[in-house]
Amino acid sequence: MEWTEAAIAMQEAGIWVRHTDTKATVLAAGVGVIAAAVLSQADDVAGVYRGAAWASAAMSGLLAAVIVTFVGTLRQIAVTILPRIESTNPLNRFAWPNLAALPNHDRSPSYPTSAHEAWGQAAELARLAALKYRAFTSSCRWFAWFIGAAVLVVVAAFVL
């Protein structure tokens, strides 16, 4: 029974990790769409620089905000998606970095050890999912600021 529960916990925690990666990938696509929308207005943005100095300064500030929020969003998406191969478990046949490092004779499972290692891997995956969700939440905040800055640039290109 303990082995079954541990296997289910590992499976669920693995799903949480995959879901976070999927959401971050969709968010990255959204960043690309917004960036393309801003870049499509390049001629209008450039036109602002042919006008008054104050308008050029305002547009420069808005463009700086777009760049900073774009980079911040991409950084947090990368933190979310990038694989983590370090493990807090010294020996665990369910963690691929540990399994890859084991000599062949240490790979044979024993039932009590397997259940213990499975629970350890479930905890490790849950910790990883929590880290990824925190990074994804930060990505969403950065993305909201990126959208706001992008909208301001596009509006300012037509108004200024």
Image (spheres, rainbow, N blue to C red):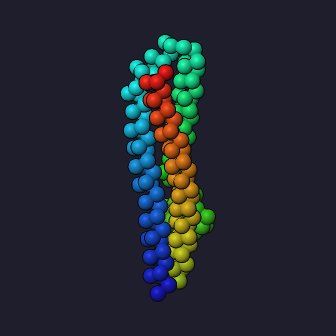
Residue 151 seen: yes
Whole-percent x, y for residue 46 in the image: 46, 18
Residue occupying the point 41% across, 55% down: 22
Q: With respect to residue 58, does 70 lie above or below?
A: below
Q: With respect to residue 133, does 31 lie above or below?
A: above
* Quadrant position of residue 38: top left
Q: Nearer the viewer, residue 147 or 96?
A: 147
Residue occupying the point 51% across, 49% down: 140
- In this view, the residue farthest toward the front is 159
Whole-percent x, y for residue 158 in the image: 43, 24
Whole-percent x, y for residue 65 in the image: 56, 32
Q: Nearer the viewer, residue 126 or 152?
A: 152
Residue 79 seen: no
Q: Nearer the viewer, residue 141 or 2?
A: 141
Q: Nearer the viewer, residue 146 or 155?
A: 155
Q: How many numbered marks are there?
A: 0
Residue occupying the point 61% across, 64% down: 88
- In this view, the residue farthest toward the bottom is 1
Residue occupying the point 53% across, 83% down: 112
Whole-percent x, y for residue 75 in the image: 54, 43
Q: With respect to residue 55, does 136 lie above or below?
A: below
Is 8 left, or right, of 54 in this rendering?
A: left
